[in-house]
Image (cartoon, rainbow, N blue to C red):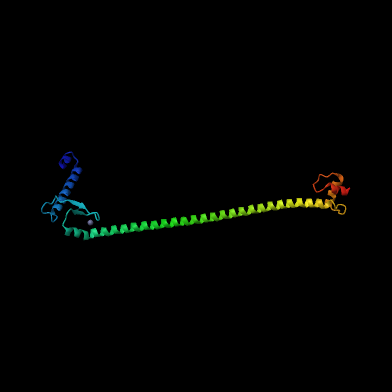
Amino acid sequence: MAEDLGCQGKVEEAQGVMKLVDQLKEERQDLEKQPGQEESPMIKQMEVCDVCGAFLIVGDAPQRQDEHLMGKQHAGYAQVRVEIERRKVRTIAILLLKLLKYVFECKKVRDEIEAREATETKLKLEREEREKERQLEREERRKKEQAGDEVEKEEKTRESSPMQIDETGDSVNTNGKDVNEESSCHHGPPLSEGDTKIDE
Ligand SMILES: [Zn+2]
């Protein structure tokens, strides 16, 4: 193949291919030189170590397996992996704690807001209740006053009519006027005919 490339004038490519071939030959020799491979050197199956990535021979002698596990490369990688796991767990734990704290803070704030709102609602209701009560009281007082006025009027009219001659108050006068001017009074029930008669 290298010769073919050489014939086609692709010298650089030919040189590259030659180099590759040499490399592969060397690697083959190296593999063949490895100890413990007297019987069938090329048939041995290889696997990659999950921890350190080294090539291992499948079904190797226990002693060699132990040697690999105790070796600097494997032990070092194992330590690094443990450390990475430890840090991962630590980071996750810290994040979880932060999240919990945040959730707790949120709950606290929400509880505070709800409590404040509840208090405000309660105060508002109380205010409204008080206002209603005051309104009722006012209405009742007004009613009482009205009733009192009417009673007073009644009483006044009742009192004033017979004592008209003696008294000189305004109310008496007006009452008297009414009574005098319209002798048949429709100004209120208490002004009975008997009274007016006395007037006349
Ligand atoms: Zn290993």
Kindly indicate the quadrant of the structure image that contains residue 73: bottom left
Residue 59 percent location from the top left of the image? 17, 54
Q: Is residue 164 left or right of residue 20?
A: right
Q: Is residue 89 left or right of residue 61?
A: right
Kindly indicate the quadrant of the structure image that contains residue 97: bottom left
Point 46% across, 55% down: residue: 107
Q: Quadrant of ligand 1?
A: bottom left
* Front residue of this view, candidates 123 and 153: 153
Q: Is residue 111 left or right of residue 155?
A: left
Q: Tell me: residue 197, above or below residue 8.
A: below
Point 49% across, 54% down: residue: 110
* Front residue of this view, candidates 72 and 143: 143
Res 21 seen here = yes
* Front residue of this view, candidates 63 and 20: 63
Residue 93 percent location from the top left of the image? 37, 58
Q: Tell me: residue 8, above or below residue 54.
A: above
Point 21% across, 59% down: residue: 69
